[in-house]
Image: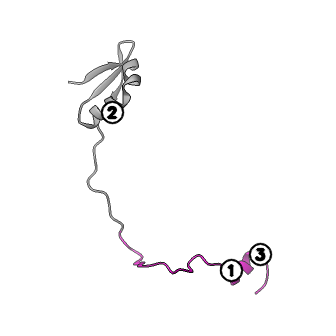
């Protein structure tokens, strides 16, 4: 059975209500006595995925982002 709260109670105690919903309780928020929203726990979709290491990169060279004179010449309009 859901727990009913007023909109004012929901605004005042939102953090506690979120904790209760996360623990499995269903909270219904009413405005002027009319149910308007439902606060329910999210379903977790299994374990987090691990990176697949598809590119097989083991390390990044120290000069990975060092400027390349040939590339700088292309962007500046100079001819190599």
Instruction: Rate crowding at label 2 as few (under 14), some (14 to 19) or many (20 or more) other CA atoms within 10 Å.
Output: some
Question: Which secondary structure class fits the magenta region best?
Answer: loop
- Which residue corresponds to mark 3? 76
Cβ atoms under marks 3 and 2 closer than 8 Å: no
Circle nearer the viewer, 1 or 2 = 2
- Which residue corresponds to mark 1? 71
The secondary element bearing badge 2 is classed as helix
Nearest to N terminus: mark 1 or mark 2? 2
Q: Position of residue 31 (x, y in %)?
A: 39, 16
Q: Position of residue 77 (x, y in %)?
A: 79, 77
Rendered-image quadrant of the N terminus:
top left
Q: Is residue 63 magenta-colored?
A: yes
Task: Give the vertical position of 12 relative to 57 (above or below).
Answer: above
Q: Is residue 33 magenta-colored?
A: no
Nearest to N terminus: mark 1 or mark 3? 1
Q: Position of residue 16 (x, y in %)?
A: 32, 30
Residue 18 is tagged as 2
Nearest to N terminus: mark 3 or mark 2? 2
Give the residue at x 25% y 23%.
3
Task: Give the vertical position of 20 relative to 8 (above or below).
Answer: below
Give the residue at x 30% y 41%.
42
Q: Position of residue 27 (x, y in %)?
A: 29, 26
Magenta residues, start to end: 52-80
Task: Give the vertical position of 48 relative to 54 (above or below).
Answer: above
Label 1, label 3: how many angstroms apart (C-alpha)?
9 Å
Give the residue at x 28% y 43%.
43
Label 1, label 2: how many angstroms apart (C-alpha)?
53 Å
């Amino acid at each position: 059975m859901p727990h009913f709260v007023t909109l004012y109670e929901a605004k005042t105690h939102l953090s506690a209500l979120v904790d209760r919903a996360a623990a499995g309780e269903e909270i219904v928020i009413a405005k002027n006595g009319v149910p308007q929203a439902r606060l329910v726990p999210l379903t977790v979709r299994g374990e987090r995925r691990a990176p697949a290491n598809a590119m097989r990169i083991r390390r990044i060279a120290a000069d990975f982002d060092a400027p390349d004179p040939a590339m700088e010449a292309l962007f500046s309009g100079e001819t190599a």
